[in-house]
Structures are given as C-alpha cells and as structure tokens.
Amino acid sequence: MSSIVMLKQRTVKSLIRATGVGLHSGAKVTMTLRPAAPDTGIVFRRVDLPSPVGLRADPFLVGDTRLASCLERDGARVGTVEHLMSALAGLGVDNCYVDVDAPEVPIMDGSAATFVFLIRSAGIEQQDAPKKFVRVTKPVEVKDGDKWARLDPYDGFRLTFSIVFQHPVMQKSGTSVTVDFADDVYVKDVAPARTFGFMQEVESLQLMGLALGGSLDNAIVMDEYRVLNQDGLRLPDEFVRHKLLDAVGDLYLLGHPLLAAFSAHKSGHALNNLLLRALLADQSAWETVTFADDQMVPPRVARLFDLQPA
Ligand SMILES: [Zn+2]
C-alpha cells in the first residue's frame, strides 16, 4: 500500500535547531538541520567560517578517523558526523543541510536517540523523486590485522558486528549482534546505544586535547572493573550495538542507502571508510538503483523504512 510512497526521497519537514557540546573540542555547538531539495544529499556547512564551506557526505572527504569520522575539504572540517549520519540513515532521510558553527557536530547524549527525537518531532517529508540506492553486486572485503569489514549482495540492509574487549563488563555483555532493517527497528534497536570509553583512556585523550567534552552525560564510562554511570546500561549489549550504530552512520557517508549485508569484526571508522572506498573503486561491485514501480520492490527492501513511522 505504501511502497510507492516509501521509496521516494525524504527530507526534514521544518528547521531543527539543537545546541550541545563537541565531544573532542568541549566547545558549545549550535546545529541546524534544514530541508533540502531532491538529490542534494546530506550536506554539512560550517556557517562560522567567513565563506561557508559545504561538505557533502562522500567517502573521499573523510579525513581524520581517530575516534570519530571527520569530513574535510578546502581547510574546513566537520567532525563526529557518524551519530547524526546514523540517525538520518535510520530514518531514511536522503536530503538535508546540516549547519554547524563549530568544527564538530554536538555529541548530545552520545547515541543517536536525541537526533532521532528531534528529526521525528520536526517531521519527515516525502519528496517527488525516487530514492536512490547503491546495490552491492559482489563481495568486497577490507582487512587490517585481525580486524575486517565486508559487504555482500543482499536485497535489503543487514548488519552483523562483533567486538573483542578484555574487560569484565564487556565480556559479560553481548559481543556480537545482527540487525536486519526489514525486521528490526532502527529507532528502538540501534539509536539508543551510547558511545563508550575507559576512564584511563579519557585522561590520556584529554592530555592530547581530545575528548574534552566527554562526560558521563554523553558516554558509558568504565574503570577497570565496572560501569561508572549511575543508571548502568540502556541495553544489555549496548557496546556492540553502538559499534553497529557507528557503522550505519559511517556507511551512509556513501551518500546513498546501501542494499547489502555488512559484516565486521573489530572494525571502526577507519576500516568502515576503507570499505566504502574499496567498493567504489570496483565499478563491477555495485550499481545505483531506484524503484519507481512498486511491483519491482524486493520484499525486504519494501520493509526497510515502513517500520520507522515518520
Ligand atoms: Zn560512535
């Protein structure tokens, strides 16, 4: 019934403004999401610079991947884009301007839940243009030591992620998770998972001028034995689900939603980005597809976005 509608592009219905701190700079950031015309993509704009530089979601603009994914062009940078990109991917938003007045997207609560809440409150609008997917047509894999990430052909969007950490809390929590967006719901199953860090690590990062905005309000923080946040975890396997949330955001830097099965072991922002570059480098491994005729839509694709009521 709604498959014709759901395979159209989407933008935000009205302007959304949020203020928070940058995870790494610790500075206050104001972010404004604005509606954008079909085929604009997700475009970040540094509105504090003398002439605003636009940075479109593009794997080849990803520079620094220490702890977060950062877009860089012509001397301008916007860091920590992955949680917002994840929320936009999860809600099926294709086109949006993201204005920030600092070099970083605000961290909010360390998950994608606040972004999801703000975007859904403002509303999501269907546009009169078919949604463009990148369909993976053959396997692509990248490795770095014992870490790896790969994409396989799949008529839908499924992610499997596993992690290994020598920490008592993390070993007790789930270390592997699979989410298939034909069955699982981004808003409930992925968005609430927060980023995490270790107390000792936070101290050394702050000496390097990183994670200056990090606190118990925007991350799960652990000492050697336990979680320091008073309310504990939001989900029993929150750590690995956050890695999956990051992957959804990093993969959306492709500029279009993927039709593929993603699987990864110990991957992170750098390897997720290498995977996209490896995919794009092999013209025979992907194609751009639209579904103008609802009869042609594979069932798993038809269910990708109808579980996320706008
Ligand atoms: Zn993250």
Image (tube, rainbow, N blue to C red):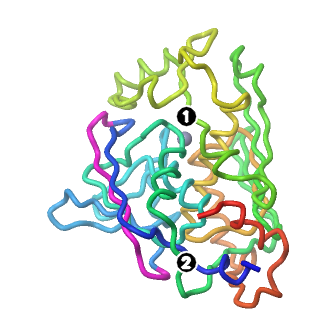
How many C-alpha atoms fall within 10 Å of the one at disc 1: few (<14), some, or many (≥20)? many
Please tell me which residue is depicted at 51% across the width and 58% down the height of the picture. Answer: 120
Q: Which residues are magenta?
A: 25-39
At mark 1, the secondary structure is loop
The label number, if any, that marks residue 67 in the structure image = none
Q: Does the magenta segment cover residue 293?
A: no
Left or right: residue 198 compared with residue 27: right
Q: Are marks 2 and 1 in contact (CB under 8 Å)?
A: no
How many C-alpha atoms fall within 10 Å of the one at disc 2: few (<14), some, or many (≥20)? many
- Classify mark 1 as within 8 Å of ligand 1 or not, answering yes or no: yes
Between 246 and 291, the residue placed more toward the observer is 291
Can you identify the residue that label 1 sits on? 195
Residue 28 at x, y = what percent?
Answer: 26, 40
Amino acid, disc 2: Gln
Can you identify the residue that label 2 sits on? 126
- Quarter-of-image position of residue 168: top right
Please tell me which residue is depicted at 69% across the width and 66% down the height of the picture. Answer: 305
* 310, above or below 171, in the image: below
| Image quarter in which the N terminus is found | bottom right
- Quarter-of-image position of residue 175: top right
Amino acid, disc 1: Thr
Please tell me which residue is depicted at 57% across the width and 19% down the height of the picture. Answer: 231
The mark tally for this picture is: 2
Between 100 and 229, the residue placed more toward the observer is 229
Q: Residue furthest left?
A: 50
| Image quarter in which the C terminus is found | bottom right
